Amino acid sequence: MTMRVRLLSWFLLACLPVPPAAAQDDLLRVEMVSAEERPVALDLQLSGSITATDSVQMSFRQPGRVTGVLVDRGDRVRQGQELARLDSVQQDQALRVAEAGLAAAQAGLSQARQASDRAEALLSRGVGTRAARDDALRALSEAQGTVERAESGLEQARRAVQDTVLRAPEDGVVTSRDMAPGQVVGAAQVVLTLAALDGLEAVFDAPDHPRLHSAMGQAVRLETIDIDRPEMQGTVTEISPLVDPATGTVTLRVAIADVPADTALLGAAVRGHVDLSVDRGIAVPWTALMRDGDQPAVWRVDGDNRVSLVPVGIAHFSNGVVYLSKGIEAGDVVVGAGSQLLYPGRQVQRAEVLP
């Protein structure tokens, strides 16, 4: 009899309603996140190299044989410093001939001036003729013209001698050398490249992305690859309007900010990170992403804190964020962490409001 009473008591207790506090404790604690519309940020990662903002390709103004090269790649040079020299035998001979020609022309001018003065004096005393005076003046004018031509020829000869010496137009560093002693070079043939040290830039071959033009003026994070150096900052200053047909890429230049002139950085490999706003989408945490058959889906929470699995369309992936193109609207509440424990209709509660 006692046993029957106990069984009946347990049955009655089981049929009693569960207190609200106990029911609340049985709800699954999950992360609830409100979906929001925001710009889709694409982290475009590029690899390139660091070059000088300004560089000068140097060449001789005349052809000749190189007799000396005084610098090598990586050398710092000062403005006016001699860099290389051509064989100047012919130019030196032409200079001596021009100097002799000028001396002869000046001597002829002196004689013509004396003859003109004498003819003028004779005419003034009445013992000379006007025709003789005019002939003397004509000879003086021709002698002056001869001196002027000789002076011009001498200046050209001196310039030709100077052009056999290649000098630095400004302070900088030699980034390439394409000549050696004994080599015959042509006029305007590039033999040295000089980089100015008043600024550095990173040059990238970027993919031809349809929104690449939006990177103009954007900030860029720069990390050196082959040398240990703190992260640098830069700004996109140029995007080529043409695609390189050989590589299918677009040249992108980034001015590096607050970096002192450092020859160690020239030619260094660098990785750049550019944030592009390519579109807008509904952002949810990556932990919210689930699968409904062959389609992506997320758990949406209704007003009673009950969940339902909603198929969605994915527009873009980003670091820790998935951008949805359909299925979820801005303001909808979805489940983040803890979504793997759900089933349709299950009631949940916010984990962060619990003690």
Image: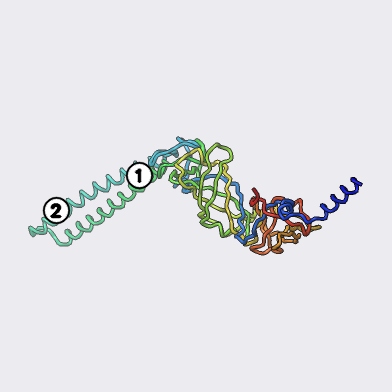
Measuring from the top left, give residue 327's x and y in whole percent.
71, 63
User: Looking at the picture, how far across and down is residue 234, in whole percent?
Assistant: 51, 49
Kindly indicate the quadrant of the structure image that contains residue 277. bottom right
**Distance between the alpha carbons at the discs numbered 2 and 1:** 36 Å
Nearest to the observer: residue 80 or residue 150: 80
Question: Where is mark 2, residue-wise?
Answer: 118
Residue sticking out furthest to the right: 1
**Which residue, given by chain and number where applicable, does mark 1 sit on?**
158
Is 199 left, or right, of 240 in this rendering? Answer: left
Q: Residue at point 44% right, 47% down? A: 61
Query: Which mark lies nearer to you, 2 or 1?
Result: 1
> Disc 2 residue type?
Arg
Bin the neighbour count of mark 1 within 10 Å (Cα to Cα): few under 14, some 14-19, many 20 and up. some
Crowding at mark 2 (Cα within 10 Å: few <14, some 14-19, many 20+): some
Q: Quadrant of residue 223?
A: top right
Instruction: Give the side of residue 53 with respect to residue 16, left or right.
Output: left
Q: Mark 1 is on which residue type?
A: Arg
User: Residue 137 location in percent, x, y?
Assistant: 20, 58
Placement of 169 over or under 145, stated as above or below: above
**Spot occupied by residue 34 in the image (x, y as percentages of width and height):** 64, 59
